[in-house]
Amino acid sequence: MEKADLVSIMPFATLCGIEVERAAPEEVVGGMDWQPERCTAGGLLHGGALMTLADSIGALCAFLQMPPGATTATIESKTNFFRPVVKGRARAVSHPLHTGSRIVVVQTDIYDDEGRRVAQVTQSQAVIKK
């Protein structure tokens, strides 16, 4: 599946302007540009926008672990915020931590343009067999 196709299977991610830069089972990288309409008070990229980025890139990482015909859904997400994003682009890098037959756990780190960690998100994703 092509990078653009991966985001297109998640209409909300497309609406939020999330782009995939690289996608492989061992690592998915994507980003979201800072935009005023994605901000909270003071021009800070909203935590919900950052969580949307992490959930989307993390879900793609989990999806790439699925057996043929299966899909995934987030069942738990834990986020730590470390600093705000006030300009540029938020970049998310997701890696699988556990790839089981029922649960996949991924860690997604979000960075600002200066390479500083903005947030760390750990998610559990259910393996849904169709």
Image: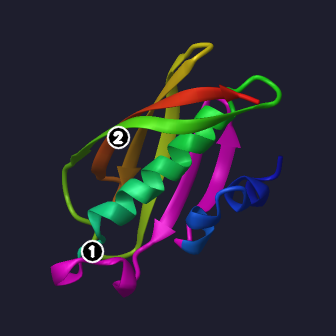
Marker disc for residue 121: 2
Please tell me whether residue 60 belongs to the stretch shown in magenta. Answer: no
User: How crowded is the residue under tag 1: few (<14 C-alpha within 10 Å), some, or many (20+)?
Assistant: some
Disc 2 marks a residue whose amino acid type is: Val
Location of residue 71 (image quadrant): top right
Is the Cβ of the residue at disc 2 closer than 8 Å to that at disc 1?
no
Rounded to the nearest angstrom, the CA distance separating label 2 from label 1 is: 19 Å
Please state the horizontal and vertical placement of residue 75, each as a whole percent of the image: 44, 34
Identify the residue position indicated by label 1 in the image: 86
Q: Is residue 101 above or below residue 23?
A: above
The segment highlighted magenta reads 16-43
Is residue 47 in view? yes
Disc 1 marks a residue whose amino acid type is: Val
Question: Residue 98 or 68: which is nearer the viewer?
Answer: 68
Question: Residue 85 or 76: which is nearer the viewer?
Answer: 76
Marker disc for residue 128: none
Q: Of helix, strand and loop, which one carries label 1? A: loop
Q: Is residue 89 left or right of residue 60?
A: left
Question: Residue 25 or 130: which is nearer the viewer?
Answer: 130
Please state the horizontal and vertical placement of residue 109, each as a whole percent of the image: 39, 43
Question: Residue at coordinates 23% horizontally, 81% vertically from top-left?
Answer: 43
Quarter of the image that includes the C terminus: top right
Is residue 112 in view? no
Farthest residue in the top direction?
Answer: 101
Looking at the image, tell me whether mark 2 or mark 1 is earlier in sequence order.
1
Question: Residue at coordinates 57% horizontally, 13% vertically from top-left?
Answer: 100
Please state the horizontal and vertical placement of residue 61, each as a whole percent of the image: 60, 37
Q: Of helix, strand and loop, which one carries label 2? A: strand
